[in-house]
Image (tube, rainbow, N blue to C red):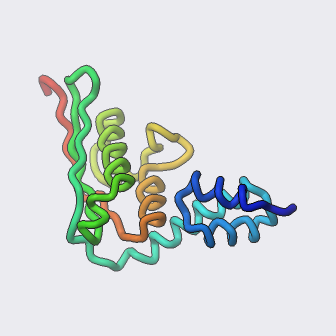
Amino acid sequence: MSYTVADIKKLREETGARMMDCKKALEAAKGDYQEALKFVKETGLARAEKKSDRETKEGYIASYVHSNNKVAALVEILCETDFVARNAEFQQMAKDVAMHVVAMNPENIELLMEDQFIKDPSITVEELVKGVSGKIGEKFVVNRFVRYELGK
């Protein structure tokens, strides 16, 4: 099976991976788009694992308040540089984690990371964080969170 430039572009838009990574994934998958998508996601996670020894001195505190204004969460996610802390994709991921905390009320970081992600149950919160980490190219750490519920 072969692939086209349009396939590379589609894979890049869907995953945020670099153009050459998308091309390599399609080559490895012999043009099978779904296999290439799986390959890109797996290598993104592998890239995140390689960064595990780096220091995280910067970060972002994301908030989410549920529409009923009775439940909210703050989540601190650390990264390596202030440049990434200002990155829109990083901030959106942090907000998604805060929303997940509101919805699922995990007891601690370990359980939070093991949870199926509320917006996409096919991945865990850990896979979400590592996936964005692999795309952006920095180590991320979900450092702490707090959840508030009216009257509790």
| Towards the viewer: 79 or 4 | 4
Q: Nearer the viewer, residue 147 or 138?
A: 138
Q: Up-down: is 73 above or below 31?
A: above
Residue 36 in the image, given as x and y percentages of width and height: 70, 61
Residue at coordinates 53% horizontally, 71% vertically from top-left? 46
Q: Position of residue 101 (x, y in %)?
A: 31, 40
**8 over 123 or under it: above or below:** below
Residue at coordinates 31% horizontally, 51% vertically from top-left?
Answer: 91
Q: For residue 59, say whether it is visible.
A: yes
Point out the image quarter for the N terminus.
bottom right
Instruction: Determine whether, in the image, residue 5 is placed left or right of residue 124.
Output: right
Q: Nearer the viewer, residue 131 or 151?
A: 131
Spot occupied by residue 138 in the image (x, y as percentages of width and height): 37, 70
Residue at the extreme front: 5
Left or right, 106 with respect to 3, comes to left
In which image quadrant can residue 100 be found?
A: top left
Residue found at the far right of this picture: 1
Residue that appears at 62% across and 72% down: 20
Does residue 45 appear to the left or right of 85 in the view shown? right
Residue 111 in view? no
Q: In the depicted view, which residue is nearer to us: 4 or 54? A: 4
Residue 12 screen position, x and y as percent = 60, 59
Up the image or down, 73 lies above or below 151; here it is: below
Quadrant containing the C terminus in the rendered view = top left
Question: In the image, is 53 to the left or to the right of 6?
Answer: left
Which residue sits at x=26%, y=70%? 81
Q: Residue furthest top?
A: 68
Picture quadrant of residue 27:
bottom right
